[in-house]
Each structure stands twice: as structure tokens, then as C-alpha cells.
Amino acid sequence: MPRTRTPDVMGEVLDGTAKPQADKPAKAQDAEPPKQQDDEPPKVRVTHYLRPEVANALEVAVLELRRLPGATRGEINKSEVIEAALQIVMHELQEHGAKSRLARMMLSGLDDK
């Protein structure tokens, strides 16, 4: 049986004749969003940068929450923890304004800059 020609993938990419693969989304935005409950509004993808120690603390918090009695692994992930924490912090900001922990932390941080 004769050997088939090896495709010139790099040449096709460089000259613009490469065909996109049908089984993979072209961009992350095209990827299928996580499954949601029928009564939940759709979620949006956002990206924020964290200091390494905060990112590590988030990982530890997720693991600690998963170890709690009654916790289900699929229901506790970084996105859910961040969303819950933001809801708590935003509620406190609405209730207490400049006296909230978020406002005090942000305003004291401005003095350092």
C-alpha cells in the first residue's frame, strides 16, 4: 500500500488555506457554557486577575467547602464561591456604604497609592 502524502499543516496555516476543525470551537466564547438550571438566568464569562496568594486562598476555600457535611463536589467550584462572596460583599456595601468592609478596604488601599 503506497504511503499517503503528509499534509503541510503549517504551510496551509501560513497561506490561509487551512480549514478550521469542525469538532473544536474556534474561540473560547464559542464554547458551550456550563449547564444551568432551567430557572436560572444565563451566566456570562468574565476574567479578572488575582494576586497569587488570593488565588491560592480561593483554591483552599473551595477544598474546605467541599469537605463540609452535605457538600456536593459539582455544586462547589471557584465560580460559585466567587459569585457567593461577591453577593455577600455587594449586599453589605448597599446596606452600610462607606462603613462596609469593602469600602473601608478599598478606600484605605487608595492611601497607599
Image (cartoon, helix red, strand yellow):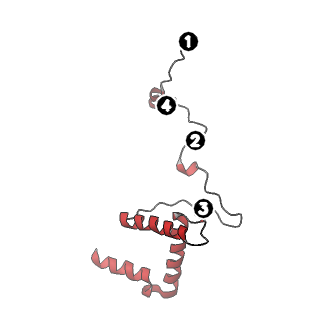
Label 3–label 4 contact, CB within 8 A: no
Q: Earlier in the sequence, mark 1 or mark 2?
A: 1
Q: Quadrant of residue 87?
A: bottom right
Q: Position of residue 22 (x, y in %)?
A: 61, 37
C-alpha distance separating marks 3 and 4: 41 Å
Task: Quickly name the residue at label 3.
Answer: 74
Relative to the observer, which residue lies in front, 32 or 53?
53
C-alpha distance separating marks 1 and 2: 31 Å
Task: Quickly name the residue at label 1.
Answer: 2
Number of disc labels: 4
Instruction: Look at the numbered disc 2 and give the secondary structure of its residue.
Output: loop
Q: Earlier in the sequence, mark 3 or mark 4?
A: 4
Task: Quickly name the residue at label 2.
Answer: 24
Relative to the observer, which residue lies in front, 91 or 1?
1
Task: Quickly name the residue at label 4.
Answer: 16
Q: Earlier in the sequence, mark 3 or mark 1?
A: 1
C-alpha distance separating marks 3 and 2: 24 Å
Position above or below: 72 against 35: below
